[in-house]
Amino acid sequence: MKRQNPLAFAKTWLMERFVEKPTGFWLDGVPVNLDALMQAANAVVKANGAEQLGHNPRWLV
């Protein structure tokens, strides 16, 4: 089974809140690292009763 792309997953759940720029990842207008981005995406996922993306245990909420 192919692993889901974390950035595509984040974009799906965070929609316009997530922006990828040449300087990095931005969430709600603030620069964030990948762990913070994925924690935010997983928080939305969890709130909607869906399965979190857990490629990295630091991403789980």
Image (cartoon, rainbow, N blue to C red):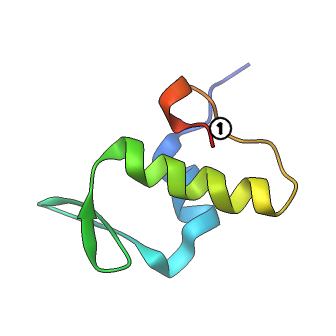
Residue 2 vs 37, above or below: the answer is above
Looking at the image, how many numbered discs can be counted on the residues?
Answer: 1
Residue 36 location in percent, x, y? Answer: 40, 50
| Residue drawn at x 46%, y 77% as measured from the top left | 17
Q: Residue at x 52, y 48 (%)?
A: 39
Residue annotated with mark 1: 53
Where residue 26 sits in the image (x, y, percent)?
A: 29, 67
Decide: is 12 above or below 56: below
Residue at image point 88% right, 55% down:
49
Above/below status of 21 relative to 16: above
Q: Residue furthest left?
A: 23
Q: Give whichever of 37, 23 is nearer the camera.
A: 37
Q: Is residue 10 left or right of residue 37?
A: right
Tell me the amino acid under the disc marked 1: Leu
In which quadrant of the rendered image does the N terminus lie?
Answer: top right
In the rendered image, the vertical position of residue 45 relative to residue 28, given as above or below: above
